[in-house]
Amino acid sequence: MKSLLPIVVRSTEIDVNGHVNNAKYLEYLEWGREAWYEQCGLDYETFGSMGIQTVTVNINVNYRRECKQGEQLTITCQPATIGRSSYVLMQEVLDERGEVRADALVTSVTMDRITRQSRRVPDELRKFFE
């Protein structure tokens, strides 16, 4: 399953170079992942009822082309790979023409809410990687 989140670049996201600051892309990607989780029916409450949380442990971002104020972008998110307690989501920041402005691989780990230790990815999440 692939999610699509449309956004518009705001003036507060622009740095002194006149384009989106690199740190803002991390926010865009986070918003895109949240949209994917919600589309899958895996919101915070659902994870909470399973006794788990997900934590981001690695993000590899490729900044391909700059984004500027007022541009309409789409943040995509889809499953890439899965392990025992970790999984990778593939994301892209696309412009109006569908050209990639940035792409990323985001690794998360499933963590027990009480013990704070890694835990097997639940089947409710694992099924989206099959």
Image (tube, rainbow, N blue to C red):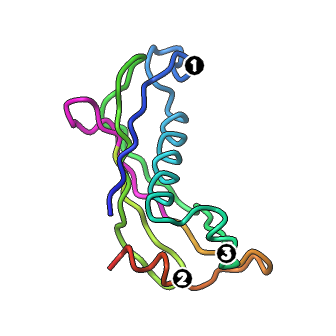
In the picture, the disc for residue 52 is 3
Task: Give coordinates of residue 89: x percent, y percent.
Answer: 41, 62
Element under label 2? Answer: loop
Residue type marked 3:
Ile
Task: Give coordinates of residue 119: x percent, y percent.
Answer: 63, 83
> N-terminal of the two: label 3 or label 1?
1
Disc 3 residue crowd, few under 14, some 14–19, many 20+, Cα 10 Å: many
Question: Which image quarter is the C terminus in?
Answer: bottom left
Give the Cα separation between the discs numbered 2 and 1.
38 Å
Question: Which image quarter is the N terminus in?
Answer: bottom left
Element under label 3? Answer: strand
Does the stretch in magenta take in 102? Answer: yes
Q: Is residue 123 above or below residue 58?
A: below
| Residue under the image location 40 percent in, 79 percent down | 127
Q: Which residues are magenta?
A: 93-107
> What residue is shown with label 1?
12
